Image (cartoon, rainbow, N blue to C red):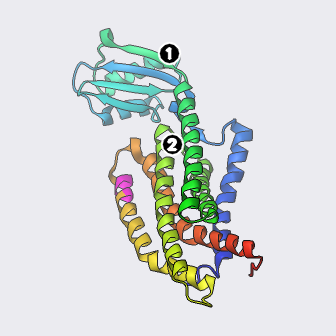
Amino acid sequence: MNIIGRRKIWFAISLLIIIPGLITMMYRWTTTGSPLNLGIDFTGGNLFNIEFKSDVSVNQIREALKAVKLEKSVIQMSGNRGAIIRTPVLNDKEQADLFAALSEKAAPINKDKLNVNKVGPVIGKELTTNALLALLIASVLMVIYITFRFEFKFGIAAIVALLHDVFVVLGLFSLFWWEIDSAFVAAILTIIGYSINDTIVIFDRIRENLNRRKKGQDLEELVNNSIMQTMTRSINTVLTVVIILVALLVLGGSTIKLFTLAMLIGVVSGAYSSIFNASPMWFVLKNMEKGRLHA
């Protein structure tokens, strides 16, 4: 496979995926005030600490929430008879309807131990700020490390590949208006770690081959060979992760489906960017440095 020679095709495929997502995010921002469908963790809501008079299951509670159109609420079980439920902000009537649905479809509520609190979006905002700060610090440290271990152009190519993965996930979640919560932030950070690991493996092989480069060997041929030498490792790694994520997506609970979906999209995108974006981008930067960029 002449991956480097067809680099414009791979770049075009990435842009065809990313640009619609960016346009959608801008449209959502102007129409709804947010580029993404923020969940309760980010927008705030009511927090109900409920104890039932008999054993209940998550499915029973979820059925009750669906009956009052609160199926997107977050449920955390506390023993066999307790549950912490986070919902959007509810007025008195909506809260009464919720309690009635829970008593009917799950179990009677012990009102003596019922605790209702209103929570703001402060935690979500703080989490987002810390995640962005962590991403910024990690990116700077990765550029420094890769520059020290390899060279600066490798670092730039790696960051471009990481941004590709982040924008692919964000764009698709905005396009399909899937809800995001605090677990989504964890998924993004995990995707970045996975993607940079695969990219570094390929870069390391390029560096090794550069040190053993024969006189007159074409750089394009060298990079292509390096990618192909690590291709099996990259494909085997992503397939093992994808199998696990697909199993979680199909068999896992509804509370982790969007987290798993974000991971699945990000892992596939990370494998693609590591193979088809990072190394070709380094090749472009290398040729620009030498003033001999060719089609």
- Check disc 2 and report the residue beneath it: 185
Q: Position of residue 242 (x, y in %)?
A: 40, 62
In space, the residues marked 1 and 2 are separated at their CA atoms by 33 Å
Few, some or many residues within 10 Å of mark 2 (<14, 14–19, 20+): some
Few, some or many residues within 10 Å of mark 1 (<14, 14–19, 20+): few
Q: Secondary structure at mark 1?
A: helix
Q: Position of residue 115 (x, y in %)?
A: 38, 14
The amino acid pointed to by label 1 is Lys
Q: Position of residue 233 (x, y in %)?
A: 40, 72
Question: Residue at horizontal 57%, vertical 44%?
Answer: 137
The amino acid pointed to by label 2 is Val
Residue farthest to the right, as pictured: 291
Question: Residue at horizontal 35%, vertical 24%?
Answer: 102
Q: Which residues are magenta?
A: 245-250
Q: Is residue 264 left or right of residue 36?
A: left
Q: Nearer the viewer, residue 149 or 25?
A: 149
Dots 1, 2 in contact, CB < 8 A: no
Question: Residue at horizontal 38%, vertical 58%?
Answer: 246
Magenta stretch: includes residue 93? no
Q: Nearer the viewer, residue 160 or 24?
A: 160
Label the magenta part by its dominant secondary structure: helix
Question: Residue at horizontal 53%, vertical 73%?
Answer: 207
Residue 229 higher or lower than 94, as above or below: below
- N-terminal of the pair, mark 1 or mark 2, is 1
Q: Is residue 154 left or right of residue 114?
A: right
Between circles 1 and 2, the one closer to the viewer is 2
Disc number for residue 93: 1
